[in-house]
Amino acid sequence: MNPESSLPSRSSVRRGETGKKRKSSPARKPSKKKPKRKRSGFFRTVARLLMVMIVLAGLCEIWMFFTPSGNRVLYLMADTLITTQHRHWAKYLIGQAELDRRVAAYQRQFEEMGEEKDTHTITLPPETGDADAAEQEEEKPKPLIEIEQISGKGYRGYVLTVNDPTKIRLGVPGKRGKGEKVSSMVARTGAVAGVNGGGFADPNWKGNGFKPIGVVISQGKLYYNGIGSKKSTQIVGIDKQGKMIAGKYTLNELKELGIQEAVTFQPRMIVNGKGQIKSQKEGWGIAPRSAMGQREDGAILFVIIDGRQPGYSTGASLYDVQQVMLEHGAVIAANLDGGSSTVLVTEGGEIVNKPSSEYGERYLPTAFLVFEHPEQADIPNIWEGLRPEDIDPGKK
């Protein structure tokens, strides 16, 4: 017997005993799995990017630390950090020892820049009544203030020209215990313009703006003395005739000079018509800046430069500010408290520039204010009877 004859035929298997077709079970759908190739390709791309970044970082480090041009950029970055509230970050670029050495070197340089005797003279325009009728018809009187927009590599700002230096007074806060915004000082006193003045104790960059550094002199009177009677300090101010005074002086020397308005700050950048900062390398980083200068005709120049705002204005070095002053005819110029304190205000308290402080306009102890009638300005001494050691600069 053929063994194959006992096996069911294909048709019987398909139809079964009744001869009916069996329903075939539906085919299983293959599960969707992410191709391994795509996943491994993604990781390879990420790995390549990381490798490129590591290589670029290594090349950048080699460039910054081992080439002259890279070194310049490295120290520019460090100097920029030194002028901010994050000074300690500079140690990650140049080390703590180099940071300390650099700060000390700048301090010595600034002191030396204030030593040379200033011999500049000014020729104020004659009073209206002193000129004859013909001259008065030919020459139109200059406005008290003029504002000019300026810009340079990476910065934008303003030059405020005060054509009569005798119309400037040093403003101080209206109440004890806390500084005052310059916009508030201008509006409160009726000034036509105002610029931030001298430095102040500022613990953790959150100070109340009430404790000045050094001295404050307003209307010929010593309002605040933080240096004693014998020590000298770097001051920026104006004497009774409208001549700008800047440099290192004792209180007795300032009295002999007939100082009228003054704050402590440094460095003096221009003396006897000569710039003291020789190059960008000595410019002390990039930051918002404020400075005061004077032309031979007596006009006072305030340079206000915004900073720390990428896309608008990164800031300027002291060398940049010095060059702006020289281009505008300054024969003497000195730095004022800049950074987040930098502000230019016009009549009514309108802020002209863009201050960089994340907390808004800062509370300050002093500001140079311009008045049409300065003899009418009411600026009382809010520090009278207070000792510097009794003032808490961090108290809110």
Image (tube, helix red, strand yellow):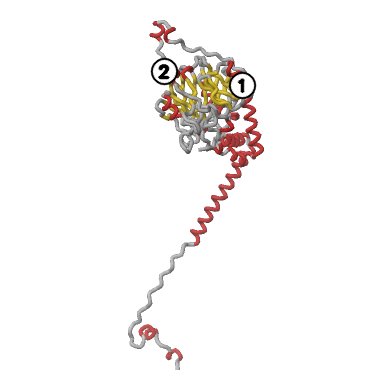
Say if 271 sits above or below 26 in the image.
above
Image spot of residue 12 (x, y percent): 37, 86
Image spot of residue 105 (x, y percent): 65, 30
- Which residue is the extreme one toward the bottom? 1
Residue under the image location 33 percent in, 87 percent down: 18
- Which residue is the extreme one toward the front? 385
Foreground mark, 1 or 2, reads 1
Residue under the image location 53 percent in, 36 percent down: 207
Q: Answer few, some or many: residues within 10 Å of disc 1's Cα (few below 14, many 20 plus, some between 14 and 19).
A: some
Say whether residue 188 is left or right of residue 238: left
Image-quadrant location for residue 113: top right
Residue under the image location 64 percent in, 28 percent down: 108
Image spot of residue 94 (x, y percent): 63, 39
Residue under the image location 41 percent in, 18 percent down: 143
Q: Earlier in the sequence, mark 1 or mark 2?
A: 2
Mark number, residue 22: none
Say whether residue 330 is left or right of residue 58: left
Can the viewer see residue 63?
A: no
According to the picture, the residue beneath numbered tag 1 turns out to be 250
Mark number, residue 143: 2
Q: Secondary structure at mark 2?
A: loop
Image spot of residue 213 (x, y percent): 57, 29
